[in-house]
Amino acid sequence: MHDALSDERLMLAYRDGDAAAFDALYTRYRTRLYRHLAHQCGDPRLAEELYQDVWLKVINARVDYEPLAKFSTWLYRIAHHRLIDHYRQHARNVATLFDGSIDPDELPAADGANPARRFERSDLASRLTRALEDLPVPQREAFLLAEEGGLSLEEIAAATATGRETVKSRLRYAVGKLRLSLQDLL
Amino acid sequence: MNDTPDDPRDPELSRLFRKASSTEPSPVLDSAILAAARAAAAPQRPPRPWWRRLQAPFALAATVMLAVVLTLTMDRNPPPDGEIPATPSGKERPSVPEQVAPATRNAAEAPAPAAPAAMQGSPGASTAKAAPNPAADAESTDMLGSERRKPLAEPALEAKREAATPLLQKSPEAWLEEIRNLRRQGHPAKAERRLREFRVAYPDYALPEDLR
């Protein structure tokens, strides 16, 4: 019954007290959101904490929910804000990178680029994780929202509160760097 | 989702990315989130009607009001001495005649003898009085004592009332005769005190020669 409903319809049904509607919605976004967060922060334990926080925010915001945007955009915007909060608390230098005023080419790599860990990784997942860790955080976020979230440029721009051209630029740089890092696998 | 011509996504990279992605949230985390969602969506208890919500405060206010009214009523209209129930403790009871008796011994002496006569008259009478308290065998002596004191207490109360009545109710002649009797019986100090009281009560009365 719930499978045929759109995300927004499911969220409205959940707002009106239909707990099963949330189950269906959760199933749709469970893997995508988790992988997005796991690739973003590079720490499974932290990813679980952030993931839980995001869903709890969705649950708590249900009373005031209105389908003003696509549910996916709304969900990833919550995730974006939660990540910014995390960076503000634990990596202030990373949080400042999200204001869009810095040239993507000059953005530094994330702190998660650990040479010792990188040496140990050899399989595909590890190579990909390492390549993502080497990306500046805003570029990585744009790439993950596009790949894991399946969002369009406009939706990424809405979710991250930036302009479409900024998103396009970040995504282009991210794709170029990843292609370079993984060219032997492509 | 390469939806526009200028979208820089790379299909090859996307395929590689999907192939490599395998991480998932733990089932424990799934259960916790779904349980939180269900708890939040659970129907809340309907709000109680206003009269049910105000039931407890109204009951409390009514109790307080009743207590205040009763207290004020008791303060303004205390029950007469005779209606005050006897204290259950036997220790406080004897003090009443002891306190009153010295001042009113003369008045109390007259009705007192009737009581012992009634007590000593028939054993059945004392048995009948003890009947309401069947467990009083061990305390029968004490009970008897208190029964004996009871008639003393009633005249004592009467004497107390008499003492409280204004002295003006006594005629001047009777009062002066009482003073003469006190002198004759060898109580000059008491006679002098009564005479002073007489002068206060009847300041214009011409005292006889023997009392000036």
Image: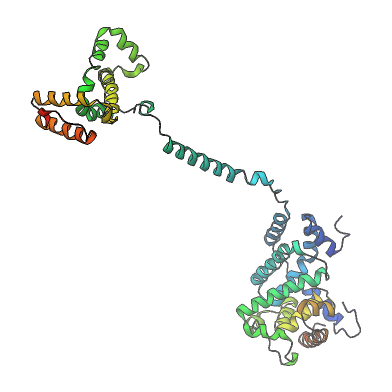
Q: Is residue B93 above or below residue B148?
A: below
Residue visible at 52% across and 42% down?
Answer: B65
Answer left or right for B188 relative to B200: left
Q: Extreme right residue here?
A: B5
Answer left or right for A48 relative to B129: right
| Quarter of the image with the C terminus of chain B in it | top left
User: Picture coordinates of residue B101 (x, y %)?
Assistant: 22, 26
Answer left or right for A62 relative to B106: right
Q: Is residue A134 visible?
A: no
In the rendered image, which quarter is residue A93 located in?
A: bottom right
Q: Is residue B179 visible?
A: yes
User: Picture coordinates of residue A115 (x, y %)?
Assistant: 64, 85
Viewer-proximal residue among A108 and A64: A64
Residue visible at 70% across and 55% down?
Answer: B39
User: Picture coordinates of residue B3 (x, y %)?
Assistant: 90, 79
In the rendered image, which quarter is residue B207 located in?
A: top left
Answer left or right for A46 relative to B69: right
Q: Is residue A64 above or below residue B191?
A: below
Q: Is residue A47 above or below residue B134?
A: below
User: Picture coordinates of residue A160 (x, y %)?
Assistant: 76, 79
